[in-house]
Amino acid sequence: MNQMHEKFTNERSSEIKDLLDSNHLPLVSIGMPVYNGAKYIRQALDSLLAQDYAHFELIISDNASTDDTAVICKEFATRDARISYHCNEQNMGPAWNFTRVLEMSAGEYFMWAAHDDEWLPNHISTIVPMLESNKKVVLAVSGWYCVNIDGEIMTTMLPPLSTVSRSRRKTFINYLLQPHWEVEKACFMYGLMRRDVLLSLNISDIFAAVDITIGNDVALVLALIATGPVAYTSERTWRKRYTYPRILPNRVQKYRRAVRSIKDFLRGRNKREFQKRWEFHRYIAGIINRCFFYDPIMHAVNLYHTLRLFMYR
């Protein structure tokens, strides 16, 4: 794997330490959109304030919560000047809120933080060097723990190694074809990104093009991958909380069927299947090829949206 897709290992710990000991640490912006998050947000904020990478700002956008979210957030904002709390007069919807925290940020790097997740103290210090050491990398991700509503670990997740390839085009395709319910690939959205690249994507259009309840996170990651390479580490540095069942077997089966059909086409196999659904395959193949020549952002959205519709047939 070439330097554009650099895998961080324990052998590089001394290099990372030297970088973090520098006096020129980049500002990391953390955006936390929230609505009625009083149950878990205190734990989330405590874990962020415990980071060993101190040069960050935390922007909280409250979507007119009706519980004690505001009380808790104001308490933390008073205690730490790095936190800014903003409360909307009315609920503007999750897409608007996700976009707002990005637009209010000022850091070189940006990450979204869910109000019910938690981060180990070395989370930011682990992923910042991935972007610092290679200016071409646009997204850095680490492994994570899947926990239940009580914080108990259900399983552990790693960024799928097969997702990252030497070819940006192949990385895009590999990520698209990864079965979401097995690898939780939507969690890439909670990695660390270059803020200027993220702003250039016009994420409002992406969120508007895809149903907010399913797919907008994956569509955004696809659009980001289309602009540059991804770096990853197998070190687990955060906890993703699940308040709903993770696996939906019937959807997994449909997704696998759709993925298998596309893989067969991309590998030049199963001509009968290709002839049977030639319109769909031609559309998918055409978008994959155009993603890196014309408008990668909207083609990324269209590609994922098409696959999602196919899955629900």
Image (tube, rainbow, N blue to C red):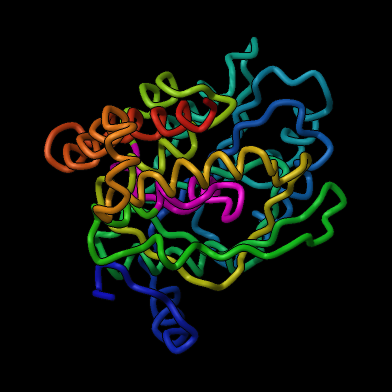
Of residues 246 and 50, the one drawn nearer to the viewer in this rendering? 246
Query: Does residue 200 show up?
Result: no
Which residue is at 76% across, 27% downward? Answer: 36
Would you place residue 301 above or below residue 50 in this image? above
> Furthest-top residue in view?
90
Would you place residue 29 above or below residue 67 in this image? below
Q: Position of residue 72 (x, y in %)?
A: 79, 35
Which residue is at 76% across, 33% downward? Answer: 37
> Furthest-front residue in view?
272
Q: Main secondary structure of the magenta part?
A: helix
Query: Does residue 72 show up?
Result: yes
As for residue 99 lying within the magenta part, the answer is no
Q: Position of residue 129 (x, y in %)?
A: 40, 69
142 lies left or right of 265: right
Which residue is at 49% across, 85% downward? Answer: 10
Locate the N terminus and report the quarter of the image it occupies.
bottom left
Q: Position of residue 240 (x, y in %)?
A: 68, 52
> Furthest-right residue in view?
150
Q: How many marks?
A: 0
Residue segment shown in magenta: 175-198
77 lies left or right of 191: right
Which residue is at 65% across, 54% downward? Answer: 48
Of residues 147 and 214, the one drawn nearer to the viewer in this rendering? 214
